[in-house]
């Protein structure tokens, strides 16, 4: 078990950033949804000031550190996701 200060279950927001394209939000969704309960998830998008990049925030209830790590691993494995927070 990984040491963490987060007490689970916990409301978590994960952010993925990439180039602004019509399919970026759906790509992030397809990466994240296999790892979480889809009924309790919200997606929010925000373009950068110049519109070149798009930030997709995914808010969900994480049940364990392993689940959270799997979400980040899926996002980081995708070349179109340039940054994660």
Image: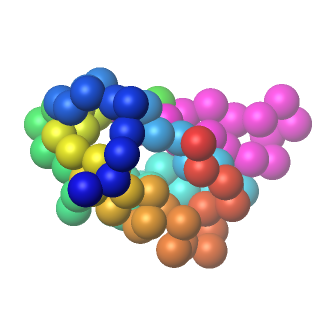
- Residue 30 lies, in percent from the top left, at 33, 62
| Residue 20 screen position, x and y as percent | 69, 51
Tell me what residue is drawn at x 12 percent, y 37 percent. Answer: 39
The residue under the point 60% across, 50% down is 84
In magenta, the rendered stretch is 45-59
Report if residue 48 lies within the magenta region.
yes
Seen as rendered, the residue at the extreme right is 50
* Along the line of sight, the residue nearer the viewer: 47 or 73: 73
- Horizontal side of 49 relative to 56 (left or right) equals right
Q: Quadrant of residue 63?
A: top left
Which residue is nearer to you in this view: 56 or 14? 14
51 in relation to 35, above or below: above
- The scheme the figure's colours follow is rainbow
Locate the C terminus and report the quarter of the image it occupies: top right
Q: Which residue is drawn at 29% across and 48% down?
A: 65
User: Relative to residue 50, is residue 25 depicted above or below?
Assistant: below
Expressed as whole percent of the image width and height from the top left, the position of residue 43 reads 39, 35
């Amino acid at each position: 078990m990984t040491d963490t200060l987060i007490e689970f279950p916990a409301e978590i927001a994960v952010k993925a950033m990439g180039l602004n394209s019509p399919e970026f939000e759906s790509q992030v969704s397809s990466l994240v949804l296999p790892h979480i309960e889809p009924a309790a998830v919200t997606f929010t998008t925000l373009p950068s000031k110049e519109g070149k990049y798009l930030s997709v925030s995914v808010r969900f209830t994480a049940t364990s550190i392993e689940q959270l790590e799997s979400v980040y691993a899926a996002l980081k494995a995708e070349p179109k996701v340039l940054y994660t927070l």
